[in-house]
Image (cartoon, helix red, strand yellow):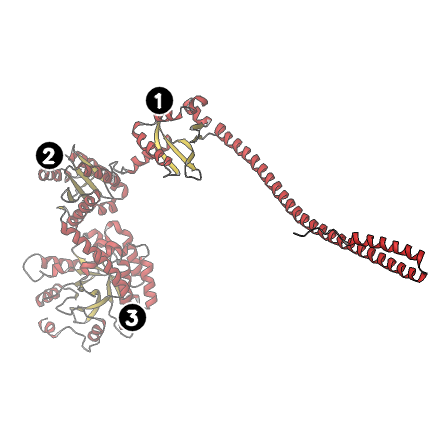
Amino acid sequence: MKKNRVFTADIIFPISMALLFLLYAYLRVFYDSMLVTAVSVIAVVSLSVYYSIGVRKKWDLLYMQKADIKRYYDDLSVEYDKLKKYHYELKSKYEELEANQVELIKSKERLQSLFDYSQEALWEYDVIEEKWYLSNRILEMYNLDKKWAETRTNIIFNKLIHPDDKYYVLKLLSQVKSGKMKKFSIECRILTNDEYRWARIRGAAFFNGSGNLIRVTGSYSDIQIEKTKEEKLLELACVDPITELPNKLWLSNYLESLVKSNNPFILMCMDLDNFKVINDTFGNVYGDVILKKMGIRLKDCTGEGSFVCKISGDEFAILVTDKDKVDGFDSFIEEFKDKISEPIRVDENEFHFTFSIGIAVFPEDGQTADDLMKNADTAMLKAKSTGKNLLRRFEKHMNDELYEKLLLERDIRKAIENGEFHILYQPQVCLEDFTIIGLESLIRWVHPERGCIEPVEFIPLAEEVGLINRIGEWVFTEACKFSAKINKRRTEPIPVSVNVSPVQLLQHDFLNSFINIIEKTGVNPAWMVIEITESALMEPHKENALKLKQLKKIGIKIALDDFGTGYSSMKHLQGLPVDIMKIDRSFIKGVSKPGNSGKLTEAMIILAHRLGMRVVAEGVEEVEQYQVLKKYGCDVAQGYLLYEPVPENKVIKIINKRSNIVPEHIYQNA
């Protein structure tokens, strides 16, 4: 810290001036002018120096003060700008707060308007204040006073809920209070005007920053009309519209309840044998009448303790729950089969029906509703495939067979994609001059693991699952290509025949598909023969005959395959567009042996010739058969005695032989 100095320039200099003045006066009196002048000069100079130093110090002080003032001004400007910015921010916050205040007031007014005038029943529960707010709609519905009701809502709500629904409602509310559920919706029955009506309660829970529930808001809707419609629809959904019997949905639900009861019962799945033929012949309306009458008969035959259901088009199911019937099921089923076998009359027509029946017994044949239905259906399919008009109880190996069927279907699909099918050709020989006059294309499947699989094993399944169309079109395409190849330069073409499934023939695009194949392959239609079975041309399939007539118009010949094994009558044969009749091998097998096979075969040959058809005998395997057929005037023979089915390259060699005749042993015995 600096000490204060006593003798400063401001003090010393005046004293010095005073002393110089006194010296000046003394010298003036006692000495000469020269000395006086010198002293005067010194005094003046000293005085000037003094004042110069004083002015300088004042200017320095003034400059410093000015700098300080400027610095203070700059600082104040910065602070002013900050204050100005804070002012605008506070003003904006204030205006925003004021707008929010206005919007909050409007929102409260809107919310209050909703509560007061909305046709919806609204409610809110303030958890902190433990207070309910109810809209006017709720108050009107229950004729309640607002203040009285809002203080007693918990008690009122608890009393109005149906006793059976109270547990679920209270459980839901406890989950909301615990924070496990932020939004909820529940349907329950609430007492309204002395009757319980269905209501839907919806709501949302709101929590504070600490996770504590602060309020719950929601709505209340009367859904009695909606529920009544649902119950009606559910009732309709569980009833078959044709027979008015319970349907598969009802059966599934009822089976589940029976399984829970753990009492033994029997499930029967029943399929009307050959109903499709009746339905296709007389029409769906006629078929529906038969199904309804059958439903009534089944109910009459089963009696009490049994339930009859219709589970699909022509399938019924019967649940036998009566203990006596379950214990004595054998006698029950025999009596039942006798009753249902009686004919059903519709108008002037009388129909006889048989059933393929599969049964599953609980709990031995299944522990769940799904397993029982699946197993009973599996047993029914087994009865149907075995020969119809049979009853089969489910056995575990049936599932293995079903699994094998699924695997086979999968492999068929792979075979189509991987090109595992190939075609063999079997020559058809003219019995008059022993020449080859036709080739039948026969599909073969060489499975990569199972080896050769016969068509009889996979064709029916392909028809069932809808793969026959792709297979059939491929066979026809390959046969057309082959026919065009071998007949292009032949003076006497050898037609190639192709088997066509009735399922193919029923397809709406069958005609266009085959015509397109003929055009793409460039084959002459006269070089192709289509073989169809008798069932494809039955009365219900009149459109099939029309399709074949169209093919015949362009030159394709039509052969009736496996004649004698179907349902043809003389009436049907008259109008069919058939050029060739192929007699089934079952007749040829016994044609040379004692019995009626030879006579029936001869009669069929005569009939076919009278109708202008050529006759082909299938399955000729013995010389004696060959000789008898020639004697009866059969036109063509086909079988292993003559030629086996062979690949394309081998059949080309056979037909290109110079003699083009059948094997020597046939010629010698002919």
Q: Which residue is mark 3?
A: 484
Residue 449's label in the rendered image is none
Horizontal side of 481 relative to 582 (left or right) equals right
User: Which picture quadrant has residue 554?
Assistant: bottom left
Where is residue 656 drawn, in percent x and y? 22, 76
Comparing labels 2 and 1, the label whose residue is closer to the camera: 1
Q: Which residue is mark 1?
A: 194
Which residue corresponds to the image point at 55% horizontal and 36% vertical from the top-left? Answer: 103
- Ranked by sequence position, the earlier of labels 2 and 1 is 1
Above or below residue 194? Residue 355 is below
- Residue 533 in sight: no
Query: Marks 3 and 2, Cα distance to the nearest angstrom?
Result: 71 Å
Horizontal side of 102 relative to 185 (left or right) equals right
Where is residue 291 drawn, in percent x and y? 23, 40
Q: Amino acid at mark 2?
A: Asp
Q: Which of 430 and 459 lies nearest the eye of the viewer? A: 459
Q: Which residue is mark 2?
A: 324
Q: Amino acid at mark 3?
A: Ala
Horizontal side of 424 relative to 39 (left or right) equals left
Q: Residue furthest left?
A: 594
Q: Which of 515 and 304 lies nearest the eye of the viewer? A: 304
Query: Marks 2 and 1, Cα distance to the nearest angstrom?
Result: 45 Å
Q: Which of 427 and 135 lies nearest the eye of the viewer? A: 135
Where is residue 517 drawn, in percent x and y? 32, 64
Q: Residues within 10 Å of mark 3 (few under 14, many from 20)?
A: many
Above or below residue 136? Residue 320 is below
Which residue corresponds to the image point at 13% horizontal and 57% vertical from the top-left? Answer: 603
